Structures are given as structure tokens and as C-alpha cells.
Image: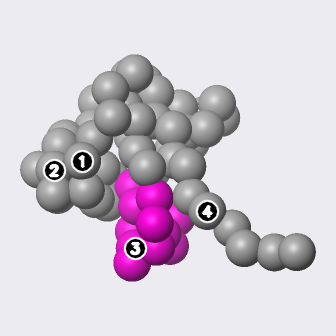
Amino acid sequence: MLLIVNGESQELDARTIGDVILHFGLEGRPVVVEADGEIIAKEQWPDTEVRPQMRIELVHFVGGG
């Protein structure tokens, strides 16, 4: 399915936000997900279905110094 993830078109085999998180290897990390302008709570990821052309923003924290 074609999704817009962090501003880039991505063809992903995903049915839910949880699948998107798994695809990008972000499970278990602190992540904020916004889908079509709405923040999606972590508890909702497995149940929130994605639609073609959905705009998803994944914001995760990276340490460094």
C-alpha cells in the first residue's frame, strides 16, 4: 500500500500503524505517531488501520552528543 511516511512515498505491506512501526524497526522505542494530522496513542497502534495515501509522521528520539 502506498503511504506518505515522513514526507516520502513508501510502498509498504502494512494494515495497521503497528505494522508500520514494525517495518521501520521502531518497536520498543519511544515514538510519537501522527496519522493524517491526528496523534495516535501507542495503545491504538495495533487497531488503527492505514489507508492508501495516508500521511504518517513518525517522530523518534535519537541520543547523541
* Mark 3 vs 2: CB contact within 8 A: no
Q: Secondary structure at mark 4?
A: loop
Mark 4 residue type: Phe
Question: Crowding at label 2, few (<14), some or many (≥20) Cα neighbours within 10 Å?
Answer: few
Magenta segment: 20-31
Compare marks 1 and 4 and give the one earlier in the sequence: 1
In the image as oriented, which residue stretches furthest toward the left? 47
* Mark 2 vs 1: CB contact within 8 A: yes
* Separation (CA) of disc 1 from disc 4: 16 Å
In the image as oriented, which residue stretches furthest toward the right? 65
Give the left or right position of residue 55, taking residue 15 as reference: right
Q: Which residue is mark 1?
A: 41
Viewer-side residue, 43 vs 25: 43
Q: Residue at x 81, y 75 (%)?
A: 64
Seen in the picture, residue 47 relative to 55 is either above or below; the reply is below
Point out residue 7 in the picture as x, y percentages from the top left corner. Answer: 64, 30
Compare marks 4 and 3 and give the one earlier in the sequence: 3
Q: Which mark is residue 61?
A: 4
Point out residue 18 in the picture as x, y percentages from the top left corner. Answer: 28, 59
Give the left or right position of residue 8, taking residue 30 as reference: right
Q: Which mark is residue 56?
A: none
- For marks 2 and 1, give the one nearer the viewer: 1
Viewer-side residue, 31 vs 9: 31
* Mark 3 vs 1: CB contact within 8 A: no
Point out residue 42 in the picture as x, y percentages from the top left corner. Answer: 25, 56
Q: Residue at x 28, y 30 (%)?
A: 51
Point out residue 46 in the picture as x, y percentages from the top left corner. Answer: 17, 58
* Separation (CA) of disc 4 from disc 2: 20 Å
Mark 1 residue type: Ala
